[in-house]
Every structure is written in structure tokens, then in C-alpha cells.
Amino acid sequence: MTIYCYIVDDERDSASLILEYIERTDGIELLGSEQDPLVAVRHILSGEINPDIVFLDIEMNGMDGITLAKKVKNQTGVIFTTGHR
């Protein structure tokens, strides 16, 4: 079984680190990534991107990860990520 994922993080370094872990993990495939949470939520809600899980940064400009998670809760699972304490 393959788990399809999507990264939503406005920090390139953090997204790159998550991508490294995805590439080293069997059974998980990246559908894409997005730095802009407003674009990401449109992609998910429209079905353009249909991930099983989203690696989602909590603190982002435009829309925080908690708000985004509430909007997509019926479409995908969420794993919160953060570079902050």
C-alpha cells in the first residue's frame, strides 16, 4: 500500500528536510509541495491534489496550519510540523 502525501510549509529548508525523510521511507510517495497555504488549501479542496496525509507547518503567513487543517479535515489526514518551540 502506498501513502500519498503533500507538504505545506512556507520554509524551504523545513520542506526539504521532510522530503528527505519521505524519500528514505518505503511506501510513501510525494504528490507535491506548496509554500503558500492559501494555494495549498485550494488544491486540496478542489481535488487537484488528493493526498492521504499532509505534512503541515503550523506557523505560516496568510493562513496558519491549524486553520488549514480545519478546512481540509474531511479530505485528508494531517501531520503537524514546526521549526519553532
Image: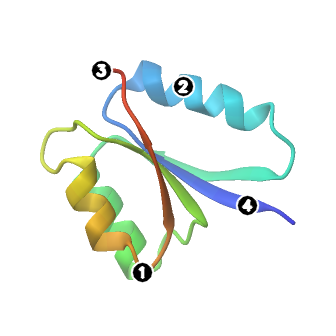
Residue 3 is tagged as: 4
Residue positioned most to the left: 62
Looking at the image, which residue is at 27% across and 46% down? 36
Label 2 sits on residue: 16
| Crowd around label 4: few <14 · some 14–19 · many ≥20 (10 Å) | few
Residue 74 is tagged as: 1
Q: Is residue 16 left or right of residue 65?
A: right
Q: Secondary structure at mark 2?
A: helix
* Sequence-earlier tag: 3 or 1: 1
Residue 21 screen position, x and y as percent: 69, 30
* Sequence-earlier tag: 4 or 3: 4
Rendered image quadrant of residue 81: top left
* Sequence-earlier tag: 1 or 2: 2
> Relative to 82, does residue 79 appear above or below in the rendering?
below
Name the amino acid, label 3. Answer: His
Label 3 sits on residue: 84
Q: Is residue 78 left or right of residue 26?
A: left
Residue 13 screen position, x and y as percent: 44, 19
> Relative to 77, does residue 64 appear above or below in the rendering?
above
> CB under 8 Å between callouts 4 and 3?
no
Cα–Cα span, label 1 and label 2: 27 Å
Residue positioned most to the front: 85
